Image (cartoon, rainbow, N blue to C red):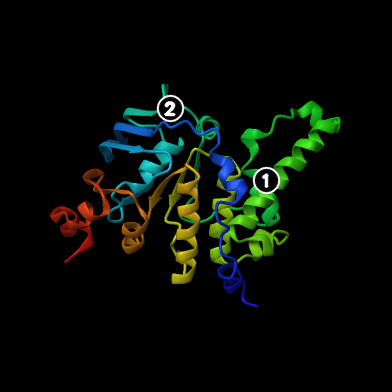
Amino acid sequence: MNRTVAIQALPIQEAPPAISSAAVTSARTALEAVDISKEFGGISALAHVSLALQPGEVHGLIGPNGSGKTTLLNLLSGYYQPSSGSIRHGGEELAGSTVQRRAHVGVARTFQKPRLLPTLSVLDNAVLGAWPHAQAGFLATALGMPRVAREDKALREHAAELLHGIGLGHVIGRRANLLDHAEQRFLEIARGLAMRPRFILLDEPAGGLTEKEIEHLSAVICTLRGAGIGVLLVEHHTDFVFRICDRVTTLNVGKMIKQGTPDEVRADAEVIRVYLGA
């Protein structure tokens, strides 16, 4: 059987327990970018952009190539630090903090090209996302203390539950480099969810997917929204964005040109001129 067909034939469960539990500790507080700018060698990549990602919301981020979408994701997830402005969650200022700190706060992300460890199994790749919740230290692990084995078992069970929930139970023991493109996309999302995030930032997750696979992705994202997780969706499939998102922000040459409901953004004259066309 074709593996792409297999993933289509395994619809995501309605609110899988492992996904629902990811939002249990989620505070009802937005992840906010406030008037942030980013320059590279004096060249402005992002200028005075503000965006608030709410828990339980799907927020679309669209715009032409080079408009600053991935730069904004890198700023929110800690891969870049802003030249000016603020990034906040609750009362904590995150600008200047590391990728690791963002993960502990509950910010997960995926990439335009899936970044997996190719020779590890699907399950092992997913378990790697749970590192913020691993409590056992080096000494306890080296000594093989019983609590290390218990913790590892719990993390692996959680990751396996996520993989089954997202539709990858049939390849759980397969090496990651033997997966097709769609399966790699969904594995990277599952790895992010193993972190039990408050927010997940998806960088062009529908790229290279078939229409049926995009429908599966839509079901996954809707499940995350129902579990209270905030989803920031960077995507060029505008029909998909306008169908699934609660709010949409449009960027062009590093500046925000429109933010609002999908209908408001789709009807905006400037958005039509610079991105959507007639």
Residue 40 in view of the camera: no
Identify residue type, mark 1.
His
Residue 269: percent from left, percent from top? 13, 55
Q: Quadrant of residue 129?
A: top right
Mark 1 and mark 2: Cα distance apart in space: 28 Å
Residue 131 is tagged as none
Question: Which residue does the image show at 58% across and 74% down from the upper left?
Answer: 5
The residue tagged with tag 2: helix, strand or loop?
Answer: loop
- Give the residue drawn at x 66%, y 48%: 159
Image coords of residue 177 (percent x, y): 64, 62
* SS for dot 1: helix
Residue beneath disc 2 = 94
Q: Is 21 drawn above or below residue 121 in the view shown? A: above
Q: Is residue 257 above or below residue 263?
A: above
Q: Which residue is mark 1?
A: 158
Q: Residue at x 50, y 56 (%)?
A: 220
Which quarter of the rendered picture does the C terminus lie within? bottom left
Name, please, the residue furthest toward the left.
Answer: 269
- Specify the amino acid type for callout 2: Leu
